[in-house]
Amino acid sequence: MRQFPFIFRILEAVEIQLPKKLDIDALSLILKVSRWHLQHEFKRFTGISVGRYYRLRLLTLAIEAIAHSDRRIIDIALDFGFESQEAFYRAVKQAFTVSPKHFKRDPTLAKLVGIPKIDSNYLQFFQMMSEHPPVEEMFESQELVGVQQNFSSVFFNSQALSTKVTLLWDNFNKATHDWRHEGRQYYVLEYRNNCSGRSGQFQMLAVCDGDEEPSNQPLASIELTARTMWRFSLPNSMYISSLFIYLHHVYCYQHKLTLNRLPYVWKLEQSGSLQFRVELKPTLELIDLPSSIHHLEKDLTLKPEQSGCLDIHTIPGNLVQKSQRLAYILEKYSDCLSAVNTGQVQLLIGRADSDGYTTSHDYQVSRFIEEKSDRAVKVEAGKYLKCVLIGTLANIGESLDSLYYSHLTESRYVLVQGFEWITCAEERSNHEWYIELLIPVAKR
């Protein structure tokens, strides 16, 4: 703790130098310490080298400038000390996995992936992690039930998040008021959605284990398969934003790990402390596809603009897992799957209006029949990854989650707003399905 004032002096000196080129020797003179002492102490109390922290902060300010101004990317690149747009593109992609153009199109993304200025909460949290590092353990398979609610990222407003979590548990208590609660375990599950990178919105569920009992509202049922997870311990909720800085920029970076599957699992202990669990996997140059993905095209499929009839239907909001929504869609449109498989009909998952690119986007499906008439609706042209899936719907759902929120981050493509197209769906033996899916993407 005694060193925190010194670390804050370094942090302030770095911020003052931005966006000038970092000069460690000049910084050492200003702070009246040796170059070695400055670098050693900063890394010891933050887990990040001075040079890397400066680079991340520089690029964070740069992508924020892209997100919130109309200036050309090349002009912003030059302002932040890059000699060319190509060098700037490489630096941004290396730090944040996507190229600068995505921050102009999706300004919210800059807030989600950038690193905020390190504060006292983070320094305290890093000390805790140094003394009590994350533990790898088995999370047993569980059937959970509860209520869901939509949230915005902690990096937007941490106080608002805390207030909404309280409301989430209030809703859970109302829905399960008459249940027998003895011996149950309680968790919060955190899921991402197709919209999350652009809108900063996601879903959280207050859930418990044990048998589902009668309720005055539809409940979400979640089946979590057994998995190895890393458990992080937090004294309380004020360290949540610090946790994600540490997770992404220190722990995963140092151990060459990345997210494998959702959800994040939170558990509040009686002491008030929080247990956070996440499933991680090694970051590899050669990546195996998730188990139910039989084939993923290397090149993009271009679908031209089409006009036709959209028969729109809303999927129940308590079907949180991808597998549940797929099962609902295939059951609802079971009478026209033969027409889907011959190309006469196609099923589109998602909302047509851009204002609807929130968590509700994943809960709308349309039967699309191409036609030319005065009442026809235009579906914009787009680029897609063709994905062939074979397996049970439960396995297919988990594989798609891994593809969207893990595998694609290590690929040439990033998920973008648009429809997911089901162009073929055949039920086979042993409850297995063969599904062809077009996924809207853009190059990183």
Image (cartoon, rainbow, N blue to C red):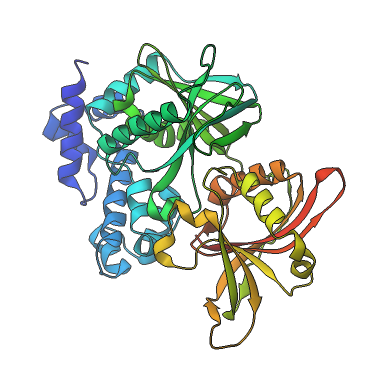
Q: Quadrant of residue 366?
A: bottom right
| 237 relative to 346, above or below | above
The spot of residue 155 in percent (x, y) is 31, 41
Q: Is residue 310 above or below residue 405?
A: below
- Dividing the picture into quadrants, the one containing residue 235 is top left
Quarter holding residue 284 = top right
Q: Is residue 115 left or right of residue 282?
A: left
Q: Nearer the viewer, residue 414 or 265?
A: 265
Percent position of residue 380, x then y? 52, 76
Q: Quadrant of the N terminus?
A: top left
Residue 257 visible in the snapshot: no
Name the residue at 52% across, 57% down. 414
Residue 224 is situated, as x and y percent measured from the top left of the image, at 62, 31
Name the one closer to the observer, 290 or 284.
290
**395 or 105: nearer the viewer:** 395
**Nearer to us in this view, 94 or 318:** 318
Q: Which residue corresponds to the image point at 24% horizontal and 30% vertical from the top-left?
A: 35
Measured as percent of width and height from the top left, residue 161 is found at: 32, 36
**Residue pictured at 61% horizontal, 87% vertical:** 372
Q: Is residue 124 above or below residue 301?
A: above
For residue 337, side relative to residue 37 (left or right): right
